[in-house]
Image: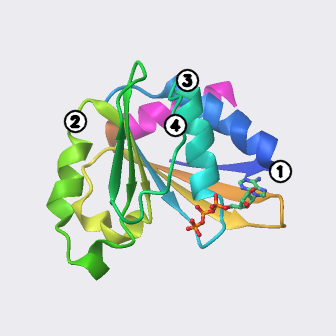
Amino acid sequence: MEFKVLWQDEESTQGFAQLLAACVQAGDIICLEGGLGAGKTTFTRYFAQALGIKRPIKSPTYTIVREYTEGPLAFYHMDAYRLEETGADDLALIEYLSRPGVSVIEWPQFIAEDLPDDYLWLSISKTTSTSREVTIKAFGLRGEELLAAVKERY
Ligand SMILES: Nc1ncnc2c1ncn2[C@@H]1O[C@H](COP(=O)(O)OP(=O)(O)OP(=O)(O)O)[C@@H](O)[C@H]1O
């Protein structure tokens, strides 16, 4: 299943982040693919806020995973970009995905072959300086269920 959405400005990105946050449950995985400046971190900030995370979201590039456990759902923010460079093991990151929280993975293409069966994959393309076209693909039963919930609310 595939679904296209438009984030016509940052407010719309925030609106979508809130919508998705209202649909997720423990164990869900959201992959964010997009080039530099696509809006992966911006989206993640709004998503985390909507999940009730009060601490500021900092880029996990150098730590690979940042954990936020103060909200009703634990939130894991991951960046797979540096994995290859640092020689760090994918397994440490993959282990987080089996924990009872919600995970957002930036640069998921670096660990695509090790992902579990169920996830949403958002491909973000910059269309203008303020708008983003986003293609959402669902994988696995839970992915399909989550995307169906998103479509219903969109
Ligand atoms: N509709 C939009 N959605 C998201 N970001 C937007 C939008 N319009 C403009 N922007 C701006 O685009 C920039 C996106 O930067 P951001 O750091 O989120 O990208 P990124 O994909 O995480 O890039 P990197 O991989 O380089 O960290 C921000 O400055 C943000 O304000």
| Disc nearer the start of the sequence (4/3) | 3
Report the residue marked by disc 2.
99
> Residue 83 location in percent, x, y?
29, 71
| Disc nearer the start of the sequence (1/2) | 1
Report the residue marked by disc 1.
8
In the rendered structure, which segment of residues is drawn in magenta?
142-154
Residue type pointed to by label 4? Leu
Report the residue marked by disc 3.
22
Query: In front here: 111 or 68?
Result: 68
What distance separates the C-alpha of mark 1 from that of mark 4?
Answer: 20 Å
Residue type pointed to by label 1? Gln
> Residue 86 location in percent, x, y?
26, 77
Report the residue marked by disc 4.
147
What distance separates the C-alpha of mark 2 from that of mark 4?
Answer: 21 Å
Q: Is residue 88 above or below residue 120?
A: below
Seen at 22% across and 61% down, the residue is 114
Q: Is residue 112 above or below residue 105?
A: below
Q: Is residue 146 magenta?
A: yes
Marks 3 and 1: in contact by CB < 8 Å? no
Seen at 66% across and 55% down, the residue is 134
Ligand 1 has an atom within 8 Å of the beta carbon of the residue at disc 4: no
Q: Residues within 10 Å of mark 2 (few under 14, many from 20)?
A: some
In the displayed image of the protein, which residue is found farthest to the top? 72
